[in-house]
Image: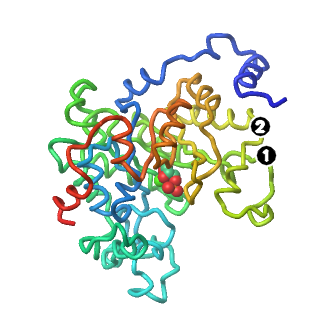
Amino acid sequence: MPVTFTKSALLLALMLGLGHAQAASPISPTELAANEGIPNPAVIAHRGASFDAPESTAAAYKVARDLGADYLEMDLQRSKDGVLFALHDNNLQRTTDVATKFPERKDSPANEFTWAELKTLDAGSWFNAAYPDRARPGFVGLKILSLDEIIKIAEGNPQHKPGLYIETKEPKQFPGIEADLKNKLLDKGWLSSTGSNQAQKNIGVGQGKGRVVLQTFEKDSLKELQKEMPNTPKILLLWVGEGSIEPKSKVTFAESGEPSKAAYYAKQEPKDAAEFEKWVDEAKSLGAIGTGPSAQLTNLGDQSYSDLVKPEMNQLTHDKGMLVHVYTVDEPVDFDKVMKAGVDGIFTNRAAELLKYYKRWPSSSVADLLQDNGY
Ligand code: G3P
Ligand code: CA
């Protein structure tokens, strides 16, 4: 009979000689989120409204902002000459025309390009080719954005100011990026908390304590983030695989015979309950106020990973006084599934759909917002 997480948590607590007070929940997720100034549940626009517009561009971030998303999510990198910018992939091939503009360097990491070089790239046309049903002439020629530019977008709608949910992406490639980020946020006035949670209600999350949430998969980067910005909420991202939670099975995707990565990940699970709990405990001990686990999606697809938001996992995390923000969920059937499992926030490419699911009705349609913003 499989051992449940609840029993395992209890057993581990007993084995470690922990008393009842420590095993019990010290604070409810609702209280914790309120204390941190983080909406609960939180709508985290993953790379902006990236279903509707090219990811991490002005079009995607402006639409997410104007829809009323709580956070603009980004993957932070640093150019060769020190500019902080948003890009998910390690190189520029998938989302830009680097192969045309810099053919001999098309496979190079983005951090080997200067900011001036990065700004010559078209970060929008790939989307029109990949998704012809969502294509728009206004997406052609969209640029990679610096953190400065994304901050300006976040501050740009007086009716709603979203926060920033910033991931240090492959931080080993960027020594000191945590300090660079702190200096930038300080310079822009984004680390000084202003306004009470009550006051935030009408203006969005972007002017209160939880206006910035920091996220990373890397424990070393979490340590640096905690050192540099001890009062800013942090999330340790979780998945099953190298560098994160140890899997029960060491069989690789290639060896597995599964038809897709999603099918493979669906069968991946933590080695045991103690392994999962170890990561939650480490996240907390390193200063995180929550975890960002992966999810298995109903229709699988390339964003479907190991299911780390089972109800007992979320309960265990809550019992330790931590929040759960799950990535990356786009369909109502999965919004429902993860909310019923107990998560406190969702990374989504479809902020419009998630807001509707929460009955937070956007004032305009995505199409109107794209048009209003010039796309
Ligand atoms: O940051 C949460 C989620 O975005 C992690 O996955 O690969 O999309 O950055 P990824
Ligand atoms: Ca991310």
Where on the picture, by quarter, is residue 301?
Answer: bottom right
Query: Which quadrant of the rendered structure holds the N terminus?
Result: top right
Q: Secondary structure at mark 1?
A: loop
| Callouts 2 and 1 close, C-beta under 8 Å | yes
Expressed as whole percent of the image width and height from the top left, the position of residue 250 reads 80, 54
Residue at 58% x, 24% y: name it: 320
Left of 286 or right of it: where is 14? right
- Position of residue 163 relative to residue 290, above or below, is below
Residue at 73% x, 49% y: name it: 267
Q: Which residue is mark 1?
A: 248
Q: Secondary structure at mark 2?
A: loop
Where on the picture, by quarter, is residue 245?
Answer: top right
Residue 288 visible to an observer of this rendering: no
Q: Residues within 10 Å of mark 1 (few under 14, many from 20)?
A: some
**Label 1 beta carbon within 8 A of ligand 1:** no
Q: Which amino acid, mark 1?
A: Lys
Residue at 62% x, 48% y: name it: 239
Query: Which quadrant of the rendered structure holds the C terminus?
Result: bottom left
Extreme-right residue of the structure: 1
Return the disc, 2 or 1, that comes first in the chain's sequence.
1
Q: Which amino acid, mark 2?
A: Asp
Expressed as whole percent of the image width and height from the top left, the position of residue 372 reads 16, 59
- Position of residue 90 relative to residue 324, above or below, is below
Q: Which residue is mark 2?
A: 272
Judge by depth and name the residue closer to the eye, 371 or 210. 371
Q: Residues within 10 Å of mark 2 (few under 14, many from 20)?
A: some
